[in-house]
Amino acid sequence: LKYTGLELIQQVFPRFRQVPGCILAPKFSTDPTVAVSMAVKTVNINGLFQCVALADVDVEEVTLYTEVPGYKNSNNLTKERLILCWPKIALGERTYHLSSHLAGVISTVDDNNGSTPHVSPSNKQVQITRAVVDGGRELWMGLDQNIFLNGEGVVTVSNFDGGWRIWGNRTACYPYITDPKDAFIPIRRFFNWYQNSFILTYFQKVDSPLTRRFITSILDNEQIRLDGY
């Protein structure tokens, strides 16, 4: 049996001993079917791990910011481990899907904060020169429009102060789901990371004798770790 596409996510850890943190498929994820499939693949990786998916709204179909919420809801792009982006962006003459640059910002922010994903990528600089829709037409949104999209669970870009920045701190489940552990990007990502790291830390103890002292040692170790956070 040969695995292809998103099914290869299951091979990342067995091959490279790395747990996936973000799933992205720039361009392909503008197809809602692909975006939903990506969101489904973020849970139960190898029966153990979880992550988030970064997807894009199709800027050829959705050219106005007011149309984004309706598109999002009608296509079921409302999962708590899905981060939805709109519009496209450009650097010089080249255009990019926002999810690809968001992934870079996320990686940079994590690296600058001890490789622990507890800081939001929102309001962090992104290396672009403009936002575009509909074949490259320039789009200039005010902060009120950026805030509107954030309130609909969509990540966008802002050129309000200090240059171009990522804007939006909520996953695609918002505003339908408001539980902070699901609705806020850094909290959702931290919970994913903590679960994954807990599993990797104690997996070596699987099948050890289950005694009260054994259980207490794990609880005590994790309490010290959580106290540090």
Image (tube, helix red, strand yellow):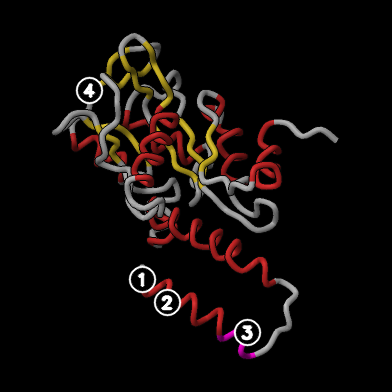
Magenta residues span 212-216
Q: Secondary structure at mark 3?
A: helix
Residue 6, x across and y down, in percent: 66, 36
Q: Which residue is mark 2?
A: 224
| Residue 228 image label | 1
Locate the N terminus by quadrant.
top right
Q: CA distance from mark 1 to mark 2?
A: 6 Å
121 vs 81, left or right, is: left
Residue 155, x across and y down, in percent: 35, 38
The answer to which of 45 and 110 lies nearer the viewer is: 110
Task: Say whether disc 3 or disc 4 marks the residue closer to the N-terminus.
Answer: 4
Quarter holding residue 20: top right
Q: Which residue is mark 4?
A: 140
Quarter holding residue 229: bottom left
Q: CA distance from mark 3 to mark 1?
A: 22 Å
170 vs 204, left or right, is: left
Task: Say whether disc 4 or disc 2 marks the residue closer to the N-terminus.
Answer: 4
Task: Say whether disc 4 or disc 1 marks the residue closer to the N-terminus.
Answer: 4
Task: Say whether disc 3 or disc 1 marks the residue closer to the N-terminus.
Answer: 3
Residue at 38% x, 59% y: name it: 178
Q: CA distance from mark 4 to mark 2?
A: 48 Å
| Residue 214 image label | 3
Instruction: Residue lying at the far top in this picture: please name it.
Output: 93
Does the magenta-highlighted stretch encompass residue 161? no
Residue at 39% x, 30% y: name it: 101
Say what amino acid the circle numbered 3 marks. Phe
Task: Say whether disc 2 or disc 3 marks the residue closer to the N-terminus.
Answer: 3
Q: Secondary structure at mark 2?
A: helix
The answer to which of 3 and 182 lies nearer the viewer is: 3
Q: CA distance from mark 4 to mark 1?
A: 43 Å
